Image (cartoon, grey):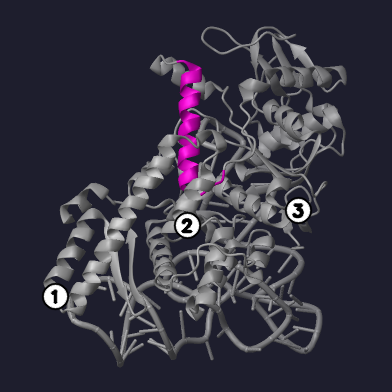
Amino acid sequence: MTKIKLYNTKTKTKEVFTPLDKDNVRMYVCGPTVYDRAHIGNARPVVVFDVLFRLLRHVYGTDHVTYARNFTDVDDKINTKAEQTGRSIRDITDETIGWFLDDMGALGALAPNEAPRATEYIPEMIAMIEELIAKGHAYGAEGHALFNVNSYKHYGALSGRSVDDMIAGARVEVAPYKRNPMDFVLWKPSTGIQPGWDSPWGYGRPGWHIECSAMSRALFGETFDIHGGGLDLQFPHHENEIAQSCACCGEDTFAKVWMHNEMLQVEGKKMSKSLGNFFSVRELLDKGYAGEVIRFVFLSTHYSKPMDWTEKKAREAEATLRKWSIAIESKSVAFYSDEPIPSDILNAVADDLNTSLAITKLHSYYKKGTPEDLQKLRLGCELLGLYIGHMDQIRLNKELESEEQKGDLFLSDIYNEKDSFEFIEQLILERAEAKLQKNYARADEIRTAFTNAGVVVTDTKDGVVWELSSSFDPSKLEALK
RNA sequence: GGCGAGUUGGCGGAGUGGUGACGCAGCGGAUUGCAAAUCCGUGUACACGAGUUCGAUUCUCGUACUCGCCUCCA
């Protein structure tokens, strides 16, 4: 069995991964607060942990891995948006969740097995807070429930901070009802349009951190294998999760391995609204960057290092994927194969998700270029969630569709796509015939029409290959009929 | 102020205590109806200082610089 090694932020070492139960490997990743389109920074953990999900499924079996990623659908940012737009909170969060799933699907991210919404676990959160109070780790005060950081001796261990140092830093909210300035909110009162639920501490809503503790417990039990998220969440979010869960359920509970991806920058600078270099995944897709291209750029930097998103990298990624795709299609590499994933690629990914090294190996298979090597290239790409070539694209779409989504609409989309594909193939043959007869006028006419419709045709020494560009418009093919 | 990460050839980016990845760009050549590609060849890089060592880019300590988090945005 492949040995997986992961860098555990909790122990600050790279460790051999041994699941608690190899028949049910459990991974929880902090998901988005759903009030707006996901920006590309939000997408980095999604892609990183999607690769880990794929690796775990490969090693332990698809049915033996459970991946949960939450949606935070109760938050002041959502309340603000509701206030500004006059729309209901549920309306906003439903829409945003739909966007998120679409956009991440475009990046080739598989749907997690569980996608719990915070608002659906309010009773579990209240129960956990009550347990914490009963055990002396939390207290109610002025409509709030607060976690007492002094009651948990390991507070700060994950992020390497001490309560005293942080208070000295003075960036904590001073509130008269707090026993220690670092105490954080488990429950807070709601008024006006703020969403709220009845609780032992009054009508209110949960603080941010308690949801992950309560939901992971509900879905996975008190102990599970991997907890992931962005490095920015390490403190305070993950620190607080650990405090809550371990204070409630015991010192050896909660996540065994903590993983944090480094942040993303844009053209060398922090992405921020004030700098104006802030953009969503959707904007990038609409600008014509294919999902695989974005994914490839992400995977070309190790997750533990800051990643710089640049136009140049995106162009290079596009050229590479195009090159590989043409090679695979011109040699008609089989789409379905029982062959194993090449061990060098698998080992690279299994070594703390060294996707950059894995890509290097992919380059070498491309360079060798025999049909066998290209098959390995394909299989390696698949482990990384990169689908190259038409049939693979369709497979990806199928894989992404969850059971509920398999409606008529989707199937007819595929059907139409196949129709277009057949028509394109027919024209390719016609052009090849024209070339044989040295009727270059007709050959070029077809190429021009293809170009207008967004179909790129390339002649290689192994034959003609074609691919759809992001501007593919099937209706423009009609002109050739 | 606290915490952490990083500094590798023109650019990006792995990795290693001893035979200098890989990609892109550049340069030279090949191939090509057109187009776009593709193919071959080509580069003595590891911030600085000291230490450990037979030997350090790789380990240790220090210096400088960059960046991030702790603050609405991951």
Which chain letter matches label 1? A
- Whether residue A366 is visible to the viewer of this picture, yes or no, is yes
In the rendered structure, which disc, 1 or 3, sits on the residue that comes first in sequence?
Answer: 3
**A119 vs A258, nearest the viewer:** A119
Split into 4 quadrants, where in the image is the C terminus of chain A?
Answer: bottom left
Q: How far apart are marks 1 and 3 (CA)?
A: 67 Å
Answer few, some or many: residues within 10 Å of disc 1's Cα (few below 14, many 20 plus, some between 14 and 19).
Answer: few
Same chain for labels 1 and 2? Say yes or no: yes
Instruction: Please give the residue where the numbered disc 1 appears in the rendered image.
Output: A439
Q: Which residue is drawn at 58% across and 66% down?
A: A358
Which chain letter matches label 2? A
Instruction: Please give the residue where the numbered disc 3 appears in the rendered image.
Output: A12
Split into 4 quadrants, where in the image is the N terminus of chain A?
Answer: bottom right
Residue span colored magenta? A88-110
Q: Does the magenta stretch include residue A420?
A: no
Answer few, some or many: residues within 10 Å of disc 2's Cα (few below 14, many 20 plus, some between 14 and 19).
Answer: some
- Determine which quarter of the picture holds residue A66: top right
Instruction: Please give the residue where the numbered disc 2 appears in the rendered image.
Output: A392
- Determine which quarter of the picture holds residue A125: top right
Q: Distance between the residues labelled 2 and 3?
A: 38 Å
Viewed as shown, does residue A102 lie left or right of A185?
A: left
Closest to the camera, between mark 1 and mark 2, is 1
Q: Which residue is drawn at 58% across and 46% down?
A: A45
How far from the left and from the top, in percent, is residue A280?
42, 41
Which chain letter matches label 3? A
CB atoms of marks 2 and 3 within 8 Å: no
Name the amino acid, label 3. Answer: Lys
Q: What element carries label 1?
A: loop
Name the amino acid, label 2. Answer: Asp
Q: How far apart are marks 1 and 2 (CA)?
A: 34 Å
